[in-house]
Amino acid sequence: MNIYVGNLAYEVTDDDLNEAFSPFGEVTSARVIRDRFTDRSRGFGFVEMSNDTEAQTAIDDVNGKEIKGRAVTVNQARPREDRGGRPSY
């Protein structure tokens, strides 16, 4: 399951996300999304867990908890929507 984590403090790292979710089960990946030009955190990230039951437990437990001083918003990630970028010919 892919999990969205929002309202992250700018100093949160991939390792911090991994550490917050690993007590609930195996974390396949943990990534803080960064601005491609400034390399500064965009304030959200994604955690992927292999077991859906463990992932749901993690969502329920971590949602509203503080990571590096900020209460985070955690829920199941929605699939990416087509944002209508440049057409590919």
Image (cartoon, rainbow, N blue to C red):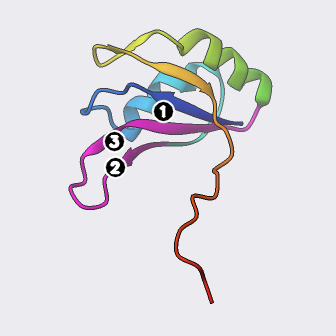
Read off the residue under disc 3: 42
| Residue located farthest toward the bottom when viewing the structure as drawn | 89
Task: For marks 3 and 2, give the CA distance.
Answer: 5 Å
Classify mark 1: residues with Cα within 10 Å, few (<14), some (14-19) or many (20+).
some
- Residue 6 image offset from top left, x and y in percent: 45, 28
Mark 3 lies on a secondary structure that is strand
Read off the residue under disc 2: 34
Q: Nearer the viewer, mark 1 or mark 3?
A: 3
Residue name at image x 45 percent, y 9 percent: 65
Residue name at image x 68 percent, y 46 percent: 79
Q: Nearer the viewer, residue 21 or 8?
A: 8
Disc 2 marks a residue whose amino acid type is: Arg
Work out whether mark 1 precedes mark 2 in sequence or the reverse, and give the earlier one.
Answer: 1
Disc 1 marks a residue whose amino acid type is: Asn
Residue name at image x 24 percent, y 47 percent: 40
Read off the residue under disc 1: 18
State yes or no: residue 14 in magenta: no
- Residue 28 image offset from top left, x and y in percent: 62, 43
State yes or no: residue 33 in magenta: yes
Disc 3 marks a residue whose amino acid type is: Arg
Work out whether mark 1 precedes mark 3 in sequence or the reverse, and give the earlier one.
Answer: 1
Task: For marks 1 and 3, give the CA distance.
Answer: 17 Å
Q: Which portion, as a residue range, is magenta? A: 31-51
Quarter of the image for the N terminus: give it. top right
Splitting the image into 4 quarters, where does residue 67 fall? Answer: top left
Residue name at image x 57 percent, y 19 percent: 23
Mark 1 lies on a secondary structure that is helix
Classify mark 3: residues with Cα within 10 Å, few (<14), some (14-19) or many (20+).
some
Q: Nearer the viewer, mark 1 or mark 2?
A: 2
